[in-house]
Amino acid sequence: MSLYVIGVLCGVALGILIITMILLWRGSCHQKKKGEENVTNGENVIIKTGSPMIPAVLDEVSVQPSDATPDNKDAGSACATSDSSGSDYETKIGTVKTNLYPRPELITLTSEKGNRGKVHVKLFYSFDRSDFVVELLEASSLPRMDTFGGSSDPYVKLMLEPYPDRKVKVSTVQKRSLNPVFNETFKFPGTFEDLSSQTLRLKVYDFDKMKRHDIIGEVVIPLADVDISRQVEIWADLEIPSLKQDDLGDILFSLSYLPTAERLTIVVIKGRDLKPMDIDGSSDPFVKVSLMKGGKKVRKKKTTVKRSTCSPVWNEALAFNIPSAELKTNYNLEIQVIDYDLVGKNDIVGYVKVGPDCEDVLGKQHWNEMVQSVDSRYNNQDMA
């Protein structure tokens, strides 16, 4: 009897043990299956960023499901909401240093003064080199300026106004193109503080070998209106230029008169920023000085030709015999700057007149100052 009871108790204990092990096994399987479902549903997924398209400072992204509990949502209050697959989720990111990836500011300047095309530039100030840098990139939709061929041969002149040396930069000529690509860089030395009172002027010309170059349009950019402490990208409409005379450059010369020899001497010193007349954006200038009496040319003299330059230096003296009695009234000078061509006709870059009959105020003033210096010199000699 006692053996029978002991056997029954052992059987019951063994059954309880087996049932307990089965329940523990099923519980562990259920927990494992639940963990796999959580991973599948996007709960607490860590994505490592190794793509070059994502900044290295974005170390990891932690994704939370949209049906997260309120406690989890509060913990992720600093997360940014995003949606790339049709379901809402929150993205937790580290601190992104955007200044490591600067983008140029894009500015569009529009104009209603005629359809003359557009010009594309980048501007910035180089603090390391103390240079104002202009990157001339391209132009687009330029008008057709050539009668034959229906195209244009554009180039660009760049200048700062006002500028102590009036430095003018000239791009290369892009032949037969209404959408030229330049990709040229120009530098203007100066301080950053001075630029706030200056203006950048861009003039687009059509190069013509046989006649005067035609201006297509211009862009005026006051530098006080843009932040050039960082790179600024500008698309600007070309405007019809003002009616003032085109900038042909400058010529420096001096006048003197020797009464004892009755000789007028003009010293042609140099030219500066002359208009380019050749296809390579340069010129071969010389100066022709004509002595005029009563509106007719009575004598003329020339300087030598300076090759491939828009800022020639001559330092040459040309002399004319003029009677002292007729110096104040009858004679004038016409000074022409001419581009020399080996084949074909020479092109006139520009001219200036000086003398008592000159319509230009500066030309008349220069002549009168020479005459007054002669009179004062001899008056002083008579008094002595």
Image (tube, helix red, strand yellow):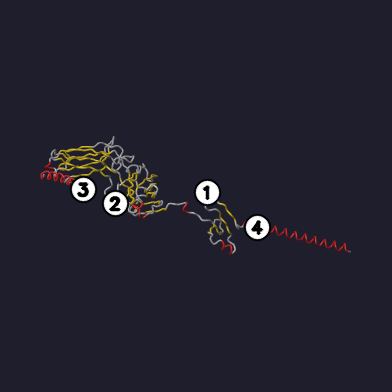
Q: Amino acid at mark 2?
A: Ser
Mark yes or no: residue 17 visible: yes
For the residue labelled by badge 1, is the local secondary structure a helix, a strand or a loop?
Answer: loop
Q: Which residue in the structure is indicated by mark 1?
A: 52
Q: Residue at x 18, y 42 (%)?
A: 256
Marked residue nearer the N-terminal end (4 or 1): 4
- What residue lies at 54% left-to-right and 53% top-to-bottom? 59
Badge 3 amino acid: Leu
Residue under pointer 3: 362
| Residue 230 at x, y percent in the picture | 41, 52
**Element type at marker 4?**
helix
Where on the picture, by quarter, is residue 260?
A: top left
Residue at 88% across, 63% down? 2
Q: Residue beneath label 2, please?
A: 242
Amino acid under disc 1: Pro
Q: Quadrant of the C terminus?
A: top left
- Cα distance, mark 1 to mark 3? 65 Å
* Nearest to N terminus: mark 2 or mark 3: 2
From the viewer's perspective, is 234 left or right of 288? right
C-alpha separation, residue under disc 4 versus residue under disc 1: 32 Å
